[in-house]
Amino acid sequence: MPIYLDNHATTRLDPRVLEAMLPWLGERYGNAGSATHALGREARAAVEASRERFAAAVGAQPREVVFTSGATESINLALQGAAAWQRGGAGGGAARRVVTLATEHPAVLDTCRHLARLGHEVLELPVVSRDDPSRAGALDAAVLAEALRPDAAGRAPGIVSVLAAHNEIGVVQDAPAIADAARAAGALLHLDLTQALGRMPVDVAALGCDLASFSAHKFHGPKGAGALVVRRGSRPVRLEALQYGGGQERGLRAGTHDVPGIVGMAAAAELAAAGLAAEMPRLRALRDRLWQALAAGIGGLVLSGPALDARLPDGTPRRLVNNLNVHVPGVDGQTLLATLDGADLAVSSGSACSSEQPRPSHVLVALGLDEDQARASLRFGLSRFTTEAEVDAAARMVAEGAARLRALAG
């Protein structure tokens, strides 16, 4: 098997999660919507028990959890659903502003651009450049404050959407401060927490968001299972559904429940939350070991994103402990990736959802890298299954590959 260091794209299914799922893939095959017989009621009970378990793992209430097929669907439901509700359903009211970042995942950016085509005002805010290593990739508070001011017509922003923990450069945003600013402006806050669970503390109440998106396969759960947390606190969030049918998930997400996927996601979330205290320092030590070995073996190697020791005001690491993004000057990134693939090392240059696009990473360009630098970048994502031996071997492979390509380039 190759050395797998692309855990921001997807993670290995934990065997304990598979064990929890197996009965629901076999003899316990009832439809959770069938209340007239035991198999259906058993499936329904499994869904509701999983809702409670997942909610506990992320600091939510069970009634706030809406099961989806993954973070992309959750993001679409959050942004399109909130925007449609704020316009009074079928677009009859006035559009409000949608505020996001230029470095967001395509699931957010493409959804926001769709909302712009529907007449909503969309602002894509810049982030702090690489010139400030302590905050590279972070949202500047002054830029956010300006975006949250009412416009000339007196319209305030309707929703703010922020990737709380970045899938490419690992930057962790100051979510509570962003939440305070959004609330003061009367806007909802959606946090994309896809990369966060199992890598940093996740408590949606403490983070202050109104909506939060998750995808199970990012924290050792199954592909095709996700959740949107719709907070029901002091100001309940209202969304328009995007699909209609049997009225499942309180009418917000029609369709037959994926019982094995939901059970697996809940099990994976519990494992991620329970193991966090031990995993964070272990992953950080592995990540730092990888950086030191790469920097020692590759002259001129440059870190992209915040410094490895950067901290938020509350002491939380500014960078995900399992993330490393570097660019190798003088090397074509795609050629290096092909070389590493041949050597059985699985890494990437950025988001899996953008890997088929010929353009350089929009995230790295937003940080201030030019296109050549962005194309010469590698992203490493570590997991609970990553070992020291794999990190050492990966660093050696990358250094040897870079040296060969530099030699060929003369």
Image (cartoon, rainbow, N blue to C red):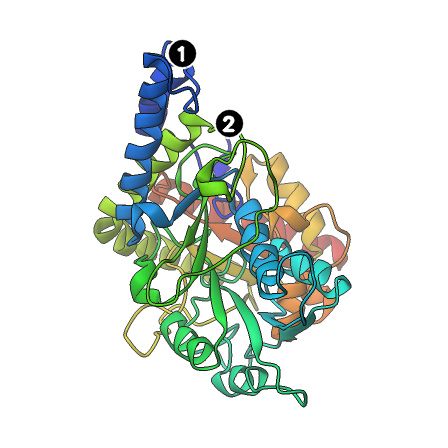
Q: Is residue 325 visible?
A: yes
Q: Nearer the viewer, residue 394 or 14?
A: 14
Q: Is residue 263 above or below residue 189?
A: above
Q: Nearer the viewer, residue 185 or 376?
A: 185
> Do tag 2 and tag 1 residues touch (Cβ < 8 Å)?
no
User: Residue flagged by tag 1: what amino acid is it?
Assistant: Gly
Q: Nearer the viewer, residue 68 or 173?
A: 68
What distance separates the C-alpha of mark 2 from that of mark 1?
Answer: 17 Å
Q: Nearer the viewer, mark 2 or mark 1?
A: 2
Residue bearing the label numbered 2:
256
The image quarter in which residue 11 lies:
top left
Q: Can you give x and y, in whole percent of width and height, for residue 192 in the image?
A: 48, 57
- Which residue is rendered at x = 44% and y = 42% of the image? 250
- Which residue is rendered at x = 54% and y = 58% of the image? 168
Q: Can you give x and y, in whole percent of width and height, for residue 206 in the image?
A: 29, 65
Q: Is residue 165 above or below residue 130?
A: above
The image quarter in which residue 40 lies:
top left
Taking the image as shown, residue 185 lies to the left or right of residue 114, namely: left
Taking the image as shown, residue 387 lies to the left or right of residue 372, namely: left
On residue 26, which mark appears? 1
Q: Is residue 14 visible?
A: no
- Which residue is rendered at x = 45% and y = 60% of the image? 237
